[in-house]
Amino acid sequence: MTIPFLRDLAFEYGACDTLTPLIRRVIARNPSPFTFHGTGTYVVGRGEVAVIDPGPLLPEHVTAIGQALTGETITHIAITHTHRDHSPAATPLKRSFGGLTYGFGPHGSGRPDSGAEVEEGGDRDFRPDVTLRDGDRLEGPGWTLEAVHTPGHCSNHLCFRLIEEEALFTGDHVMGWSTTVIAPPDGDMGAYFHSLEKLLHRHDTIYWPTHGPAIRDPHPFVRAYLAHRREREQQILDCLADGASTIPGIVQRLYAAVDPRLHPAAARSVLAHLIHLVETRRAACDGPPSLQSTFRR
């Protein structure tokens, strides 16, 4: 399945770009294989604003956000999830500019993660001032954000719908530039399938991911994401049928053309698929599925 990736993004690090009447964005200088050009911190509203995903702990990024909001007040700091490229800057931002922090909960609050370090790593210091659940709302002058719980990439992952513009801030749940890493134990492939399908029942007209450009035709993109994951499941089942019974063997076959730096993440993604396949009784292994397990159909 070919996903119609979107990778064109004109920006300048530290600049505050006006995207719509209610949305601005400042991109942090933290490019990586997991963050694309870097973390896009969104500002919603004018005067009294919400900041979504303040980003990594980079002083120059916090300064850039503050300079962009001279004369305005931060009333809400909303966190899509607690990876270190999304939430750590909430602490200095709150210290310098005020506002309460909002999120689903601390890292692993939706599923125990046993301390595993994956992707950009978990921000284990973050504790929201206000805990959000699916459907909860944040409000300011002329803007309303609704929390949409979308576990999968992280058990505490939230998207935020800007009701006035029918827009959805998707964090890492759906990104235009790349597929999303699902890395156990906090990442859950079964939950991710469910959360993607949940978006197909919604009527958001545009997605604003934390990394990369906007997705302006959301439903076909989500369907492509789902088809890609189902195709990957079938490829893994085919590998098992062909005698590749370990995760390193499967990664070697399926990700031969991928940057080797991403192979550890690919291994955890394959593990996520295999856990889901075992849970749905389409594959089996002895004992709980792990990176060291031997699998069979």
Image: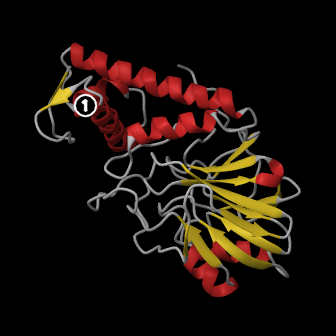
Residue at the right extreme?
A: 21
Q: Is residue 94 left or right of residue 245?
A: right
Mark 1 falls on what kind of element?
A: helix
The answer to whether residue 258 is above or below residue 243 is below
Q: Residue at x 63, y 38 (%)?
A: 176
Q: Residue at x 44, y 52 (%)?
A: 154
Q: How is the image coloured?
A: secondary structure
Q: Is residue 258 left or right of residue 44?
A: left
Amino acid on which the number 1 mark rests in the picture: Val
Percent x, y of residue 214: 72, 43
Q: Is residue 68 visible?
A: no
Q: What is the quadrant of the C terminus in the image?
A: top left
Residue at the front extreme?
A: 135
Q: Residue at x 20, y 39 (%)?
A: 289
The local crowd at label 1, few if under 14, some if 14 to 19, many if 20 or more residues have their Cα within 10 Å, is some
Q: Is residue 283 left or right of residue 232?
A: left
The answer to whether residue 208 is above or below residue 107 is above
Q: Which residue is mark 1?
A: 278
Residue at the left extreme?
A: 286
The quadrant holding residue 45 is bottom right
Q: Residue at x 82, y 80 (%)?
A: 70
The quadrant holding residue 16 is bottom right
